[in-house]
Amino acid sequence: MHRAPLLIARTPVPGLAKVTLYQDTWLGHVLARHPEMRGMDGAVLSVLTAPSLVTLGGLGQSGVHNFVFTNDTIRSPSGRARLAVIVDPRDAVVCTALFHAGSKITSGKFIWSP
């Protein structure tokens, strides 16, 4: 099955030169579960290309821990939640993106920061 990319982002994370967000993931997962993300694909690209922090997340479908990309300046309209972009580092794909104010989305283990 051919998957159409919505965006391809170059990341600064060593060993993860680029990450792809596929259209089916954006429409069928991100927007279906997080409608507040409508129109935020540019913000997702910004978080991937210029993260403030990348931490280790939970186990993904590929059996490896996901990476959680955040940028402290990209927040929800209320300003309380950071945009978190969850990436499968093995397949170099975006799994989801959402505004998240808590710490449960990440183990807190440091992967990368500028």
Image (cartoon, helix red, strand yellow):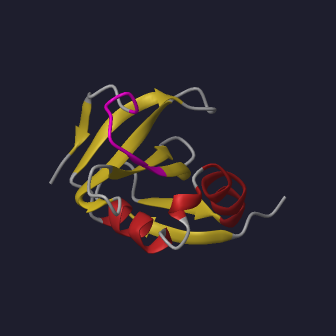
| Residue 99 part of the magenta segment | yes
Q: Position of residue 96 (x, y in %)?
A: 55, 49
Q: Is residue 70 shown left or right of residue 19?
A: left
On the image, the x and y values in percent for residue 64 come to: 52, 28
Q: Percent x, y for residue 74? A: 29, 62
Viewer-proximal residue among 27 and 111 = 27
The N terminus, quarter of image: bottom right
Task: Give the quarter of the image for residue 28.
Answer: bottom right
| Residue drawn at 32 percent across, 41 percent down | 101
Tell whether position 42 is magenta. Answer: no
Return the residue nearer the eye: 34 or 110: 34
Q: Magenta residues, as a range?
A: 98-105
Q: Residue 26 falls in which quadrant of the image?
A: bottom right
Which image quarter: residue 112? top left
Which residue appears at 46% of the width and 27% of the height? Answer: 58
- Residue 11 visible from this viewpoint: no
Lateral position of residue 74 relative to residue 57, left or right: left
Above or below: residue 56 compared with residue 30: above
In the picture as drawn, the residue positioned furthest to the right comes out as 1
Count of marks placed on residues: 0
- Identify the main secondary structure in magenta: loop
Is residue 64 visible in the rendered structure shown here? yes
Position of the C terminus by quadrant = bottom left
Q: Is residue 63 above or below residue 112?
A: above
Where is 106 relative to 90, above or below? Answer: above
Q: Answer left or right for 2 relative to 104.
A: right
**Going by the picture, which residue comes out furthest to the front?**
78
